[in-house]
């Protein structure tokens, strides 16, 4: 692989104008496709194999035209202190609003009058109007949304407090500011690392191009493939982070090759052949982990994984082709001014490179006290992981949105006026006649945990009915989940429970059931791939265990902040609640790829030094001397990119950004930088043990490009040149 990539890097360097033109053309083509693509008309959410989905499908069949999957809105009215919504003046305002809503759009199925639908609170302070639409939130026209907003605004101006909740006004999360923050922070890290604006700008430029192509393609295909609103956010988050990191590794190795006296084309070829091999491996692990999300069998999650994986593939291809092409345009500017001046002196830079750098000093500290470092690292992450034992999974609702949003204020007003469970009613679908439905109502009323149960509403054929059950507690509570299970246990197979709350419960259960198989798949894959790369049994085992430790610790931090509320205000968490159901699997998939990334770049240098005759301790120091600075910069960039998404209002995106940022922090700086060298120091030569029978079976994967020493000249420029750069 290294030889092929070496040739690819040299070819891209020589034909840099053609390569750059092709990538610019791809970006333009994807941009045109995104600009001309129709607005997505669907963003369906289905969970095959669950009771909530079967109930939803039954509703579609037995209640045609009812808009079972349509958007909903609740216009909540609150009277001034000391007054009631039943007062004639306030009642007139509400009735005017109902009339305005009915005539405001032809996409409306039904608008309820709160005074005939018993939608006024017992104390009379609050009332609400329910609005049902024929289509889902993504298909609502701008005119329909404006009519809803205008109706609420008009009533607001007549002495009432009016808020609008529901999914009718859902919007795409804004990404621009978050991405900009991540890019700025990454740029600062790159400038400090390279000491050259050109070298720092290359990873940023290529990462933006890669994300632009990936996200534009997703936007262009969103309508055809029914992609959700968070698909492009996840793809841009991961694509930007890995795009910068992969380019960083190639540029760093290129500068190192120049420092060893090779000309620019040879240096580009060797950089792609060595660091590029590790980039391919690291990218492959991320892609497999993301594509592996399909095993959960939730279409929305599978599509998100495939879309993000596609963006990672683009990042890898750009690192292997566009980066060497741009290095050809950059010339000597890729090296900092100080290094270029030092290169003109009599070996000044060479002497500087002999001094121990930060990585060398840290590695020597670890190998002197490996047991202490190991114990501190494991106990520290273990303590942070403790909250993970209290993990409760669910999906965020309007109750976790900022109080500045109308949806959150409507949620709070309904909770105050009608009870917390009113924001998450359960829809019970009875596949039977009226007598069966009436028996179901009686059975449900005999259970605990409900606040209200409506009479059964039959369909026109009389062979099915709907019953609405309002829980006592909020939608995301354990009590509400218990109520759903109790209803299912107490009724027969012809009674199904659905609604947004039940769908969330079933989704969480399915994600929980899939976590262990998915984790086994990912960890097993890590072990096989690392055995192939390092030709060792204990090194992959150590890497997999370290990965599990960092993921569990990151989950513990997420639980502490978003479920328990520790330091919640610091991260903009206004309402605690269950952890997003897909969070553990996302963290396993993404962090797995990044952990293997850092593992490869650190440990392959150690293995190379060990194979060439260095003692185990010396090999550890050599690996850190060459790789620690670059891996540190890569990890800081990852953390910066992911942290940029913590500031978003969307609770799901905020949680993903925080979780991935702390996971990278733990894995890169505690596991890879401390626990890994400590374990290797304790194992000594045993770390590189591989059974002879396995050694014969495994193919030789030349990740660090050792074969290039035999197939390519050390330098095409004759005598070695002065050391240009310290890497």
Image: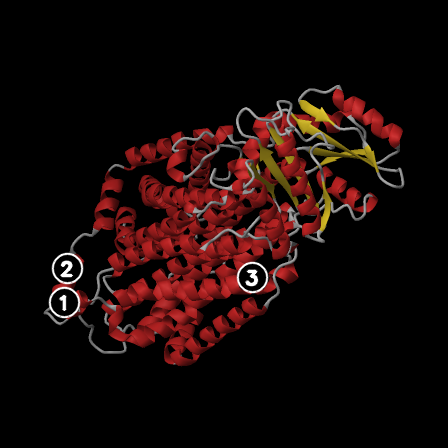
Q: How many marks?
A: 3
Mark 2 is surrounded, within 10 Å at the Cα level, by few (under 14), some (14 to 19) or many (20 or more) other residues, namely: some
The x, y position of residue 409, in whole percent, is: 53, 36
Q: Which residue is disc 3 drawn over? A: 218
Q: Residue at x 35, y 60 (%)?
A: 249
Q: Quadrant of residue 82?
A: top right
In terms of depth relative to the viewer, which is nearer, 164 or 333?
164
Q: Is residue 521 left or right of residue 718?
A: right
The residues bearing labels 2 and 1 have C-alpha atoms spaced at a distance of 10 Å
The residues bearing labels 3 and 1 have C-alpha atoms spaced at a distance of 47 Å
Question: Disc 2 or 1, which lies upstream in sequence?
Answer: 1
Q: Quadrant of residue 441?
A: top right
Q: Quadrant of the C terminus?
A: bottom left
The x, y position of residue 246, in whole percent, is: 39, 60
In terms of depth relative to the viewer, which is nearer, 126 or 96?
96
Label 3 element class: helix
Residue 454 circle label: none
Mark 1 is surrounded, within 10 Å at the Cα level, by few (under 14), some (14 to 19) or many (20 or more) other residues, namely: some
Q: Which residue is disc 2 drawn over? A: 352
Q: Which residue is disc 1 drawn over? A: 342
The x, y position of residue 335, in whole percent, is: 24, 68
Label 2 element class: helix
Q: Is residue 159 visible?
A: yes
The residues bearing labels 3 and 2 have C-alpha atoms spaced at a distance of 48 Å
Up the image or down, 409 lies above or below 169; here it is above
In terms of depth relative to the viewer, which is nearer, 525 or 450?
450
Question: Disc 3 or 2, which lies upstream in sequence?
Answer: 3
């Amino acid at each position: 692989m290294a030889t092929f990539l070496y040739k690819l890097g040299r070819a891209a360097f020589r034909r840099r104008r053609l390569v750059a033109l092709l990538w610019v053309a791809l970006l333009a083509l994807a941009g045109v496709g995104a600009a001309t693509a129709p607005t997505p008309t669907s963003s369906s959410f289905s969970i095959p194999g669950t009771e909530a989905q079967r109930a939803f499908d039954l509703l579609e069949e037995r209640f045609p035209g009812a808009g079972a999957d349509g958007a909903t809105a609740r216009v909540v009215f609150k009277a001034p202190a000391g007054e009631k919504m039943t007062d004639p003046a306030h009642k007139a305002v509400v009735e005017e609003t109902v009339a305005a809503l009915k005539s405001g759009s032809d996409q409306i199925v039904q608008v309820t009058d709160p005074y005939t639908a018993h939608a006024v609170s017992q104390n009379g302070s609050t009332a609400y109007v329910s609005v049902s639409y024929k289509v889902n939130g993504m298909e609502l026209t701008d005119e329909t949304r404006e009519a809803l907003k205008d109706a609420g605004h008009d009533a607001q101006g007549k002495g009432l407090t009016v808020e609008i909740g529901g999914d009718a006004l859902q919007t795409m999360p804004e990404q621009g500011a978050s991405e900009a923050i991540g890019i700025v922070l990454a740029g600062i890290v790159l400038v400090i690392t390279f000491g050259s604006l050109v070298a720092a700008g290359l990873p940023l430029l290529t990462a933006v191009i890669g994300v632009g192509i990936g996200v534009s393609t997703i936007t262009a295909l969103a309508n055809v493939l029914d992609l959700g609103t968070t698909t492009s956010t996840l793809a841009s988050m991961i694509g930007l982070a890995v795009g910068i990191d992969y380019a960083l590794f190639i540029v760093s190795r290129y500068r190192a090759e120049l420092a060893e006296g090779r000309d620019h084309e040879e240096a580009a070829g060797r950089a792609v052949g060595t660091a590029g091999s590790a980039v391919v491996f690291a990218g492959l692990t991320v892609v497999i982990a993301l594509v592996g999300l399909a095993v959960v069998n939730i279409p929305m999650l599978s599509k998100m994984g495939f879309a993000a994986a596609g963006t990672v593939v683009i990042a890898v291809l750009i690192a292997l082709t566009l980066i060497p092409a741009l290095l050809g345009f950059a010339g000597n500017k890729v090296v900092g001014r100080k290094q270029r001046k030092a290169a003109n002196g009599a070996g000044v830079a060479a002497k500087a490179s002999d001094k121990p750098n930060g990585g060398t000093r840290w590695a020597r500290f670890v190998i002197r006290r490996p047991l202490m470092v190991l114990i501190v690292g494991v106990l520290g992450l273990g303590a942070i992981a403790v909250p993970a034992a209290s993990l409760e999974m669910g999906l965020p609702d309007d109750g976790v949105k900022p109080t500045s949003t109308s949806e959150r204020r409507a949620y709070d007003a309904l909770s105050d006026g009608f009870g917390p469970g009113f924001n998450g009613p359960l829809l019970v679908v009875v596949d039977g006649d009226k007598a069966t439905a009436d028996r179901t109502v009686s059975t449900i009323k005999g259970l605990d945990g409900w606040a209200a149960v409506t009479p059964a509403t039959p369909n026109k054929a009389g062979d099915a009915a709907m019953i609405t059950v309002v829980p006592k507690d909020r939608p995301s509570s354990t009590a509400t989940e218990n109520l759903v299970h109790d209803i299912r246990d107490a009724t027969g197979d012809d009674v199904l429970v659905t609604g947004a709350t039940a769908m969330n419960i079933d989704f969480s259960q399915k994600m929980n059931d899939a976590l262990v198989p998915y984790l086994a798949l990912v960890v097993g894959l890590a072990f096989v791939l690392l055995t192939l790369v390092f030709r060792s049994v204990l090194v992959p085992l150590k890497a997999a265990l370290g990965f599990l430790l960092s993921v569990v610790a990151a989950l513990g931090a997420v639980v502490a902040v978003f479920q328990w509320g520790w330091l919640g205000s610091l991260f903009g968490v206004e309402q605690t609640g269950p952890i997003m159901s897909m969070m553990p699997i996302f963290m396993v998939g993404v962090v797995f790829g990044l952990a293997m990334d850092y593992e490869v770049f650190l440990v392959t240098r150690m293995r190379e030094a060990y194979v060439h005759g260095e003692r185990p301790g010396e090999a550890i120091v050599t690996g850190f001397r060459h790789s620690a600075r670059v891996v540190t910069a890569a990890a800081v960039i990852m953390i910066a990119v992911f942290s940029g998404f913590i500031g978003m209002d969307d609770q799901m995106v905020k949680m993903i950004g925080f979780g991935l940022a702390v996971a990278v922090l733990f894995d890169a700086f505690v596991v890879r930088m401390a626990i890994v060298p400590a374990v290797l120091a304790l194992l000594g030569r045993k770390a590189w043990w591989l059974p002879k029978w396995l050694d014969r079976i495994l193919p030789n994967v030349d990740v660090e490009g050792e074969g290039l020493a035999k197939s390519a000249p050390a330098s095409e420029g004759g005598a070695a040149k002065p050391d240009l750069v310290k890497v």
